[in-house]
Amino acid sequence: MQPFRVHILGCGSALPTLKHYPSMQIVECRGKLFMVDCGEGAQLQIRRSGLSFNKMSHVFISHLHGDHCFGLIGMISTFGLLGRTVSLHVYAPADLEDMLDRQMQLFCRDLGYDVVFHTVDTTNHLTVYEDHSLSVETIPLDHRIPTCGYIFREKPTLPHIRRDMIEFYNIPISQINNIKSGCDWTTPEGEVIPNKRLTTPAEKPRAYAYCSDTAYIPTLHQHLKGVTTLYHEATYADDNLLMAQKYHHSTARQAAMVARDAQVGQLLLGHFSSRYSDESVLLNEAQEIFVNTSLTNEMAVFDV
């Protein structure tokens, strides 16, 4: 099974602290790197992670609060200084495009590569990126400004052909793809070997959902069916429920309710308020509802 991982570069909320960087992650899937949100310090955190700048060609911004996008222009500038020639694709709400263009005209002249902007409709559940192995969908969220999450879904792969069956029946290499596609094999003597004897099932496709920032949405789980790993903001605990409601954020308990109702495999909590010096209160609160919950932290890596 090929790697499908989430690298946490930052999991704090808007107020800077010495403990956490603002929101930013890199999703690694089948040899590709996708950045999700890009807070301050992104380029330093990428270097600390050991991931390659050159393998990252797509950045997905959830909304235009600074703790989710202030690191973008610095990263774009650094890519230029490194001699990048491959295009960088940025997916974000429409208002970022003009702002980013003006920043680039001022700070990033003669980059040597193109920055391609893709406007994201935060109000609909749409596919915004697709290649032969992966698709990326938006999830409408409920925050103070237009905001969406993203779902990274693997595409199904073909079944695995059993090498012992190839050797036993002397199946020519030219027929392997046909068998993977579901064909039976007929021996020279006319015996039909059913496909299920020749193959083993492919791994179930995995999916990763990123939900930050948002108020609790009771129907959100409907968009998350089939998700293996869910990252959901947990800015507050129940002791600050009124703050969560006022600023359109979620509590750890509410994040766990979404995970439970969506029947995901595991829940990752992040976007922690600076008021919590000990985030175990958030973890304990969530685990009362959904046991397979983890706190994120800088440089942590989670398998999807």
Image (cartoon, helix red, strand yellow):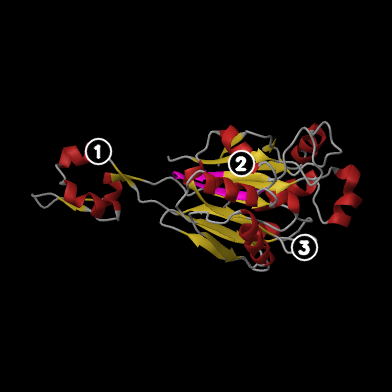
Residue drawn at the location 64% of the way across and 39% of the way down? 9
Q: Earlier in the sequence, mark 3 or mark 2?
A: 2
| Eye-nearest disc, 3 or 2 | 2
Reading the image, the residue beneath label 3 is 145
By secondary structure, the bulk of the magenta-drawn segment is best described as strand
Residue found 75% across the figure and 41% down from its top: 12
Classed neighbour count for the residue bearing mark 2: other residues with Cα under 10 Å, few (<14), some (14–19), many (≥20)? many
Residue 87, can we see it? Answer: yes
Name the residue beneath numbered marker 2.
Answer: 43
Closer to the camera, 76 or 244? Answer: 76
Question: Which quadrant of the figure contains the N terminus?
Answer: top left
- Residue 50: x percent and y percent? 53, 33
The residue range painted magenta reads 27-38
- Vertical placement of 120 versus 15: above or below? below
Does residue 100 appear left or right of residue 237 in this picture?
A: left
Q: Position of residue 40 (x, y in %)?
A: 70, 44
Say left or right for 1 vs 247. Answer: left
Dot 1 lies on which element?
Answer: helix
Q: Which amino acid lies under the numbered mark 2 shown in the image of this protein?
A: Gln
Give the structural element (helix, strand or loop) at label 2.
helix
- Tell me the element at label 3: loop
Of 199 and 304, the residue lying toward us: 304
Q: How many marks do you count on the picture?
A: 3
The residue carrying mark 1 is 163
Q: Earlier in the sequence, mark 1 or mark 2?
A: 2
Cα gap from disc 1 to disc 2, whole angstroms: 45 Å
